[in-house]
Amino acid sequence: MYDLTGFQRDLLYAIAGDDEPHGLAIKEELEDYYEKEIHHGRLYPNLDTLVDKGLVEKGERDRRTNFYSLTRRGRREIEARRDWEAQYVDADGEPA
């Protein structure tokens, strides 16, 4: 996960927090978090990068709508990241 951008990591967390979200649901989730518009030209290439890296699986709900889910590797990467963060900050945000 060290080679991902912050935006790509946020995409992983947004996908993990929902059951097979479609692209627009992910976009809305991140727009709420960032408090600004996320353009399609930023969203979908980054989702494709996560798919290419084997962290996310892309499926087709219908001919116009794709859904995304974490792979086992994606879940392991999130867990490893959380373990790494826990070395420095506890669950309350205090130094470990």
Image (cartoon, rainbow, N blue to C red):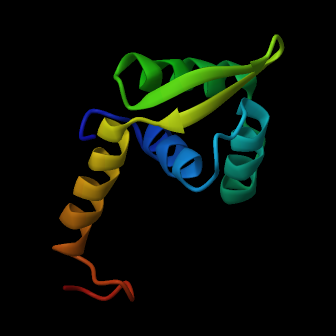
| Residue 3 higher or lower than 42, as above or below | below
Image coordinates of residue 83 in percent, x first then y, are: 21, 65
Task: Give the mark count.
Answer: 0
Q: Say which quadrant the N terminus sits in.
A: top left
Residue in front for this viewpoint, 88 or 47: 47
Image coordinates of residue 77 in percent, x first then y, are: 28, 46
| Residue 1 higher or lower than 50, as above or below | below
Looking at this view, name the residue that lies furthest to the top: 63
| Residue 48 higher or lower than 83, as above or below | above
**Residue drawn 45% across and 21% down?**
51
**Residue drawn 76% across and 42% down?**
25
| Residue 45 higher or lower than 55, as above or below | above
Q: Quadrant of residue 26?
A: top right
Q: Quadrant of residue 20?
A: top right
Q: Quadrant of residue 80?
A: bottom left
Q: Tell me: 63 left or right of 19.
A: right
Image coordinates of residue 9 in percent, x first then y, are: 43, 44
Residue in front for this viewpoint, 23 or 58: 58
Residue in front for this viewpoint, 21 or 11: 21
Image coordinates of residue 96 in percent, x first then y, are: 19, 85
Q: Tell me: 44 left or right of 23.
A: left
Q: Tell me: 87 left or right of 59.
A: left
